[in-house]
Image: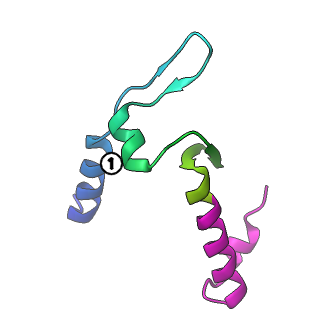
Amino acid sequence: MNPQERLLQQVILGNASDCEIDKSGRLLINGPLRQHAGLEKNLMLVGQLRKFEIWNDSAWQNQMQQGIAKIQSGEIELTDRLLDLSL
């Protein structure tokens, strides 16, 4: 019943679409989703615990550089919960 959560669900789930797998075992992502995410030839499949994300390779590399810089600068506080997160 939280209006912010409901809006986020509508935006995310409202734009979801079924994806098919071709005969070669490739996941076929429709054009609007590829365009929205900026997906081109080189992609990154990034595991996120029980889910995964698909990123444009250069966008992912940029995201990682920014994240590392924020951690190193102390902008991101490594709480006990984050320090316990390990693989």
Q: Percent x, y for residue 61? A: 65, 61
Q: Find the residue positioned furthest to the front.
A: 41
Magenta span dominant secondary structure? helix
Q: Percent x, y for residue 68? A: 69, 75
What residue sits 25% from the left and 42% below the top? 14
What residue sits 24% from the left and 49% below the top? 10
* Left-right relation of 14 to 58: left
- 84 up-or-down from 32: above or below: below
Which corner quadrant of the image does residue 81 belong to?
bottom right
Label 1 amino acid?
Ile
Dividing the image into 4 quarters, which one contains the N terminus? Answer: bottom left
Q: Percent x, y for residue 43? A: 60, 43
Query: Observer-nearest residue: 85 or 59?
Result: 59
- Local packing at callout 1 (Cα closer than 10 Å; few below 14, some 14-19, many 20+) is few
What residue sits 61% from the left and 74% below the top? 66
On whether residue 69 falls in the magenta region, the answer is yes
Q: Percent x, y for residue 27? A: 53, 25
Question: Residue beneath label 1, please?
Answer: 12
Dividing the image into 4 quarters, which one contains the C terminus? Answer: bottom right
* Left-right relation of 44 to 15: right
- 66 up-or-down from 62: above or below: below
* Left-right relation of 29 to 13: right
The answer to whether one can see residue 79 in this image is no
Which corner quadrant of the image does residue 62 belong to?
bottom right
